[in-house]
Structure formats: C-alpha cells, structure tokens
Image (spheres, coloured by chain):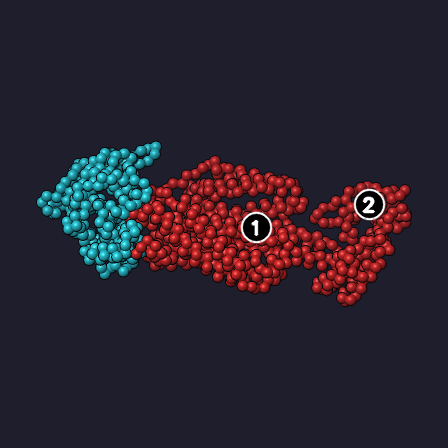
Chain colours: A cyan, B red
Amino acid sequence: MLKVENLQKNYGEKLQFEALKGINLSVVDGEFVGIMGPSGSGKSTLLNLLATIDQPTKGQILLNGTDPGSLDQEEIARFRRRELGFVFQNFNLMPTLTVEENIVLPLTLDGEKISVMKKKLQILAEFLGIEPLLKKRTAEISGGQAQRVAVARAMIHRPGLMLADEPTGNLDTKSSKDVMNLFKQLNEQEATTILMVTHDPLAASYCKRIIFIKDGELVHEIRQMRGQRDFYEKILSELARIEGVDNEF
Amino acid sequence: MNFNQMVMRNTLRNKHLYLAYFLSTLFSVMVFFTFTVFAFHPSLTNGLNKNVQMGMLAAAIIIYGFAFFFVLYSMDVFIQSRKKEFGVLMIQGMSPHQLRKMIFIENLVIGFSATVAGSVAGIGFSQFILWFANVFIHVKFYFYFPVMAFLVTMISFLLLFLLISFFIQFRLPKLQLQELLKAGELGKGRLKLSLIKAVLAILLIGGGYAVALATPGVAVVFVMLPVIFVVIIGTKFLFEQLSVSIIQWLKGRQHLFWKKTNLVVFSDLAFRMKDNSRSFFLVAIISTVAFAAIGTLYGVQNLLLQSYESEPYEFQVIAEPEKLSAIQTQINDQLRDNHIKNRSVMVKTYYDNEGKQFLKVSEFNQLAGLLKEGSLHLSQGDAAVQLENDTQFGNAAVKSKKVTVGTQTYTIEKLRTTKALSAYTAVYVLPDSADVSQLTVKSFAAWITPDAKRAELIAAGKKVRTGTHSVVMGKTLMEQTTIDGYAPILFVGIFIGIVFFFSAGSFLYFRLYSDIDVDVEKFRMIYQLGLSKKELRKMIYQQVAILFFTPIAVSVIHGAVALTAMYHIFQMNMQLAGWEVLGVFVVIQAVYYLIARNFYFRKVYHLIQVAA
C-alpha cells in the first residue's frame, strides 16, 4: 500500500544538510509501524514527506499507487482529506470549532452530505467513547481527550494511511496508554494502517513493527513476536545500541 | 456542518481575532460615510462654486483610495497572523481554492457588517464634525437625513470589499505547509539588512530636503513632484532598513541593551520595526500629506488675513478731487447712520509721468497723526524723504538718492517707515514749498474707526460698497468676505486632515492590537520570572510609545520641511501658522498615545493574569 523508494531530502542552500540519505520502505495494508531514532535522525522529516507537508529532494513515494509529488495543489488537498489522517503532538485542533465540528472537518472540506457526516460521527464517537465531549469547545477538554478527538478527526474519513507524529508527546502516562490502546484497537479492529513517529519506547511497544533511523538512514528493523512486554525490552536495548550508549560505558 | 457554516462559525467564534480588522474597516467606512454626508449636504452643494465641488469630489476619491489601502493592509496584517490556522486547515485537506473561498466569505461577512455599522457610526461622527466646524471655523451646517450618503457608501464599500477579496488572493501566504504549522512557534529567524538601502534612505531624504529648502521662491512648485517622490522612496527605506540598522547597532552596546528592562523591550524591536515598516510608512506619508494640506490652506488664509490686518484704515479712497467729495459724503453718512465713531483725514497726492507719488510734508503729518505715528520734519528746503512699508512681503520700490520734480532736484535724506501710505511704488515726502503745479493731483481720504464693533463695520461696509459702486471696500467687510469664501475649502481641508490624523492613530493601534498575543506570551514569560506591575507598565508604555512616535516624528519633520518650502513660494520663512498645525497634530497624537497605552496595558495585564 505504501512504497518509498530511495527517498532523499536535503535542507539548506549553500551548506547542504542531508536529512534523509535514500530511504527504502514498504508498508502493507493493516500494518502498525513505528519510526524511532535519536533527535535529528530524520524521522520527522520522513513523516513530513509522507504527509505531503514537505517535498522530497529525490526519490519517490507511492501511496496506493499515487505519487503525491505529481499532484497539483488542489489534488494534494483532495488527497490529504481522502487518503491521509493526521495526529499531532500538539493536537492542532481548531479552537474556534466544537469537538464534533473538528471531527467532521475533513468531511466538510470534501463537501460530504450532512446526514452522512452525522452518521459517521455517531458511530465513531461511540467507538472512541467521546460522545459526552461532542458539544464542547476544545479549550474545555483535557490533553488526553483532545488527542482522542484528534484521532477521531484523523479517522472519520477512513483514510488509507494514518500518520501520527509523537502522539503521546504532550500526554501523561495514563492518557498516553489510553491513546495507544486506541491506536491498537483501530489497527486491529478496523484494519487501519498506521505510521507513527515516536521516541517513547512504551508507545512504540504497541506497534507491530519498528523501523530505526539514524543520521538519515534506515539502520534496523524489529517486529513484535512474543508480546508487548518482550517487545518493549527489545526496543529499549535496540535504542541503547543505536544511540551508542553501549560504547559510552 | 457544511463548508459555509464552518467558515461562519470560525469567524463568529473568533471575535477577539477579527475585532481589530473589523474595527479598522468599520473606521474607514465611517470616515467615508461622514465625508459623503458633507459632500451631498444641501447647503454645500447648492451654494458652492464648481471649484469647491471639484475639490470635494477629489477629496472623496482620496479618502476612498486611502480606505482601500487601509483595509487592504489591515486585511494583510490579519491574514499574516493566521498562518497557523491555515496550516491546520490545509493539513486536514483544505485546498488553496477553498482557502480563498473561506477568506472571501469572511471578508464579505465582515465587510458587510462593517459597512452597515460604519454608516451608523458615521451619523454620530458627522454630528461631531458639524459641531467642530461650527465652534472652530464658524461654518454652520444643518442636519439632514443622508440617504444619498448611505447609498454611495454602501455601493462604494461593497465594491471595495469585492476588489479586496480579489486582490487578497495574491497575498495569501505561499509558504510551505511545514512553515505554516510551525508559525508562532519558531523565532523569527534572522533579519537581512541592506546597508545600501540604509545609506540610500539618508541620501534620498537628505537630498530631497536640501533641494526643497534651497530652491528659491516660485521654483519650489517645479521641484515639488520630484522631491516628494525621492523623499517617499527614502522614507520607505528609512523604515525598512535604517530603523532596523539603528536598533541592531543599539543592541550591540551592552551597557544600554543589557540594562534592566531594555533587554526585553529591545529584543524584538528590530523585528517589530521590520514588520511594522509598511504601516509606519503609510502612516508617515498620510500624516505628511495631512500636514501639507492643512498647513497650506491655513497658512494661505492667514497670509491673506494678515495683509488686511496690516492695512491701517477702515475705509480709504483715492480719486480725482472733484469726484471725492461725493464718496466722502457717502462714507460719512453711513458711519453716522451706524453710530460709528471715526476720524478721517483728506490729503492731496501728486503723481509724475513716471508713476512716482509725492506728498507734502504737512499733509503727510496729518496722516501720520491719524495713525499716531510721529510727525516728520525735513531739515532744509531741498530735502525729501522716501517712504517704505514694514511688511513681510518686502519692499518693491527702488531706493534712490535724489528725486527730481519739475526743475527742482531734492536730496533724499532718509527713509521713513510708515503705514500711512502703501509704498509699493516710489513715494516721496516733499517740503510744503515744493512746486507741484506740473504734477497730476489726486485726493486721498482715509477713515479710522478705533472702537467700532465688527458687525457694525461689516454692515456699514456693505452699504458703502453699494453706495459707491464698489469703489470703496471696508477692511472688515473684505476680511469677512475672505473668511466666508475660504470656509468651505478650509472645512474640507481640515476635515480630511482630522480624518487622516485619526486614521493614522487608529491604524497604529490596530497594528499594536494584532500583535497582542505575541506580547502576552512574551510578557507572561518574563512576568513569571519576576517582574513588578510597575516595570511591566513601563515596558509596555515604552513599546507603545516607539510604535506611535516613530512614524509621527518622521512626518513632523517632513511636514516642517514641506511647509517651509511652501512659505518660500511667498518669499517668507516658516510662519507661526505652520508651527501651530504641527503642534496641534503632535498634541492630538500624544493624547491618542496616552489613551492607547492605557487600554493596551490593561488588556495585556488582564490576559497575563488570566493565563498565569
């Protein structure tokens, strides 16, 4: 479903900085993939390229057979609201809209019928357990609730791919677990394909597969085999290895 | 929720954000409406001559053009402050087309409500102007219901908002989504400075000033346009580059920059200057235009009135001796009928073929006595005195050493400064013994009315004018005629001036207000570090002062140079009237500043308290 070939990204004009040095990656339908790596490793750059927020210097992205790079502005907008769902560290909800209005925003932009919006909203709110929040304004809800709303907004249009950038970065431990359980649930019950950037090992342990990036290159990849606890420990040791902690002591 | 509902809700629930923009548009509508109320005022349209009506029309177009840029800039400022919001919407799949549509709908909603609200506010504002006109420049207008003004305002502004909605598309941020989303999070990056432009700013403005001030007399009119052009460009560079360079330089001086609250005030000042450079530029130019317009109108009126003021006699007439007595009777009758106490003198004056004018010394002394000037004595039989006037217009007559009357040559022993006779041509006082039989004789009669009331003099003046078939004009009547003739033009000029002054201040305040979030953020951080309310107030006052007075200072200097050059046309230096106009403007801005800073401080302090 997602195929990335030799993806490169340079920043700067005179003094060029290679943020990504040729990434190859493929994600199949229904996968839940985590991207980890030290600060400045290029993981956010990769996510931004996939999210069509930024354009690659070289290489290709194919999402369900479409290369977003070949689309014009209008088509990219349509692509985003139909094929992609976003969850951000800082939620990025519209403060002027109510919770329910925020959730249906992608459908609104796509010109969906009101009755369809309502129906989809109801089903999703029930599934995510956020019905009591629907009429509230975003300033009235907690961080954990806000992230649930953001997940709902990312899901309502059944995107092909859900992208999450440090979704637990601004949350306390309990809210983090809630949100990650939600991701897991979505992935397992709704077969949503999820790609998540994180440096929180606990959040990462909910994934099925984790890709490690360092200095703009894909360095390693591990899969969950024997349960979440085992996976969590594997992640920790892998991080220690990649970040070079082993050599420090 | 469909798209239009979404846009409407987003607008209506975000009052805080839209308020500054709404108020600035409302303000420009109000100004335009008020002006059209006068432009279509029955007593202005019926009685006025073509020129004044053309002037009103031109003024309306200027105000409309100004409103256009005012709204466009406000809109632009407003849009630039919403990058993050646009980013969030675009990541959810809003297309550029939809973004434009959203802005268009918003603009229409705000524009329409501002047009209606502005017209209503305009009714109130026009009352204020009526009162002002009545109290300060003695022009009376009665109230009427301004249907035509409503229509014109509605149509003009709906058109304006359509146009702006169209133009604003090109001003939408073309940044990458990534940057949009991070807007407001990151620092503002580094400023790029252009030394060439900073130097050009000094050269262009300095050069413009030098040319304007050094050009003599009427030639000022010819250098005016190029000078204005050069100075405008220079001013643009001044705000864009030079101001920023100066602040950067100040920041380099640690004993200044690292001192108490200066650190905070200066920290983002350079960026603010850069961000505000266009607003500053607009405000400075508008204020200068207002200065120049008002200063010129007020100055010219003052000059005219002064030229009457220097005239010592209420009535005076020169005529052939046989015609004079009839006129004299007329004037005396009128003065008697109006119970005006007066004194008068009649003398004979003589002209030669070259246009020189002569008086005998005893007769000159009669005139001098009437004006309580000292009398004149000639030392010997062949001595004469040339007269000159002490006016700021200078003295046109040629000074000579000797003067010949018939066969006798007189030596001019001195110059006598007097008001008794106007001395534009050469006027000489001769001994009583002089032989004047070869010269043309005329009679000159003059009246003074020391204690008379203005109204009586005007009434008498009118009758005298009619009775003498306009040969004699009363001084007071001429003055009043000038004031009356000038009043509508002066009114229009002063009105535009007031509007521009108010606009300049409001524009600055709205500009300040649109940065309030950044300020609250900044000050909250410092407030939590430990800052007293007093220090906070001081910092905010400083910041507001810099914002208010930077463009004002520039425009006052521009205005002073422009008015000085204007007076050069009349061979004069800067006059009191010019300083008065500049002074009043500075006072208005100072009052505006005092009000604005208090409002702003209270608002910021409140928001800090709420958030902390």
Which residue is more in the foreground, B492 or A205? B492
Question: Pointer 1: what residue?
Answer: B58
Rounded to the nearest whole Å, what is the CA distance between mark 1 and mark 2?
47 Å
Q: Are marks 1 and 2 in contact (CB under 8 Å)?
A: no
* B240 sits to left or right of B214: left
| Residue at position x 24%, y 45% in the image | A83
Give the mark nearest the N terminus, 1 or 2: 1
Counting from the top left corner in percent of width and height, residue B144 is at: 56, 64
Inspect the image, locate mark 1, and give the three-letter code of the amino acid beneath it.
Answer: Ala
Q: From where the camera sits, is residue B596 visible?
A: no
Under mark 2, the amino acid is Lys
As drawn, A55 above or below B290: above
Regarding residue A20, the answer to whether it shows in the image is yes
Q: Residues within 10 Å of mark 1 (few under 14, many from 20)?
A: few
Q: Residues within 10 Å of mark 2 (few under 14, many from 20)?
A: some
Circle 2 residue: B356
* Chain letter for mark 2: B
User: Residue drawn at (56%, 38%), measured in percent from left and top?
Assistant: B207
* Closer to us: B423 or B65: B65
* Quarter of the figure with the C terminus of chain B: bottom left
In the rendered image, the quadrant that contains the N terminus of chain B is: bottom left
Residues indicated by labels 1 and 2 sit on the same polypeptide chain? yes
Residue B186: x and y in percent read 33, 45
Left or right, residue B167 beside residue A153:
right
Which picture quadrant has residue B396? Answer: top right
Q: Is residue B250 left or right of residue B574?
A: left
Q: Is label 1 in a helix, a strand or a loop?
A: helix
User: In terms of secondary structure, where does tag 2 sit?
Assistant: loop
